[in-house]
Image (cartoon, grey):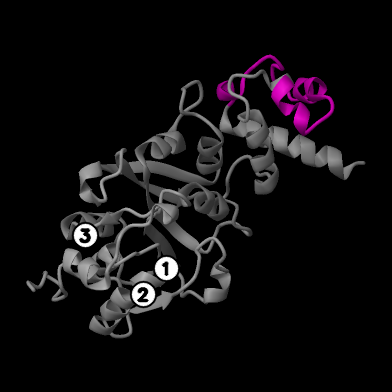
Amino acid sequence: MTATPDGLPPLRDVIRACGLTAKKSLGQNFLLDLNLTCRIARAAGPLEDVTIVEIGPGPGSLTRALLMEGASHVVAIERDERCLAALHDIAAHYPGRLDIVADDARKVDYEALSLTAPARIIANLPYSVGTPLLIGWLKTDPWPPWFDRLVLMFQREVAERIIAKPRTKAYGRLSVLSQWRTEPRILFNVPAGAFTPKPKVESSVVEFVPREKPEPPCDATELEKVTAAAFGQWRKMLRASLRQITSDPEALLGELDLDPTARAEELQVGDFCRIANALSGARNTR
């Protein structure tokens, strides 16, 4: 068994020894190229004085890269019990630098982990849970959040929606939520052939830097409701799409000097915030 630069067995050998196969139900696609995972780790750095939270490490390809690139403390959250033995081997190789949380990242109380600040989330997210996890982190309250940055891998199509601008086909609720609270940008793309098994799509690594004071201020949960309604039915006019959350959308939009016949993809991020604030204010005055 040939050792890799970190002195641990090659990942293909680890997967074979653990009897691992990627589970479609968990959205798993293993990333085995340590050169590529080290590139992700370097893009998310510097790592020396940051607590890294890694979601869905699987057999530990990115975990190993983070530790090789100097991360002093990694907290790896993994729900697949089959991967835990490989992660414990990594922890033994890097004493005191890797903590393993055997849990579902969607259910974890991150505040209860008592993470040493600053903390940073870095992950090759399972395709099946990437968007729900991102939305949950973007709704963190209070804001600024407990993390100083997110560096996450998504399907390329999702990444393009995250950074999309108004009046483009990809612009949607994920664009609004991401761009209101953070400054997102695609760092680089990852070919499908880098994964095992090979997915049908390419992926992208996206960085999110939290805005200290998102403008205009509004309630994140209210904004999520507004964007879900506005973008819920493609190309419907706002006066129709917002009817599910307000009885008189035309009056509300008129008060905000927004065209009721406009479509969601025509509005700026700040326009959705103003709608959310108006709806919240209306409820509070009843």
Q: Which amino acid does label 2 sit on?
A: Leu
Measured along the vertical axis of the image, is residue 263 above or below residue 28? above
Q: What kind of element bears circle 3?
A: helix
* Dots 2, 1 in contact, CB < 8 A: yes
Numbered mark located on residue 215 in the image: none
Task: State which tag comes first along the sequence, 3 or 2.
Answer: 3
Q: Which quadrant would the N terminus be assigned to in this image?
A: bottom left
Q: Name the residue under label 3.
A: 38
Q: Where is residue 28 in the image (x, y as percent from the top left)?
A: 36, 55
Seen from this angle, which residue lies furthest right? 286
> In this orientation, does residue 72 appear?
no
Q: Mark 1: few, some, or many residues within 10 Å (few <14, many ≥20)? A: many
* Quarter-of-image position of residue 111: bottom right
Q: Is residue 267 left or right of residue 133?
A: right
> Residue at position x 42%, y 68% from top?
78
Q: Position of residue 84 (x, y in %)?
A: 36, 75
Give the Cα separation between the discs numbered 3 and 2.
Answer: 21 Å
Q: Where is residue 191 in the image (x, y as percent from the top left)?
A: 23, 42
Taking depth in this image into account, of 42 and 172 the one nearest to the observer is 172
Task: State which tag comes first along the sequence, 3 or 1.
Answer: 3
> Residue at position x 64%, y 33% from top?
272
> Residue at position x 64%, y 16% from top?
262
Measured along the vertical axis of the image, is residue 155 above or below residue 235? below
Q: Name the residue under label 1.
A: 78
Instruction: Give the residues drawn in magenta, as a range.
Output: 240-267
Q: Name the residue under label 2.
A: 84
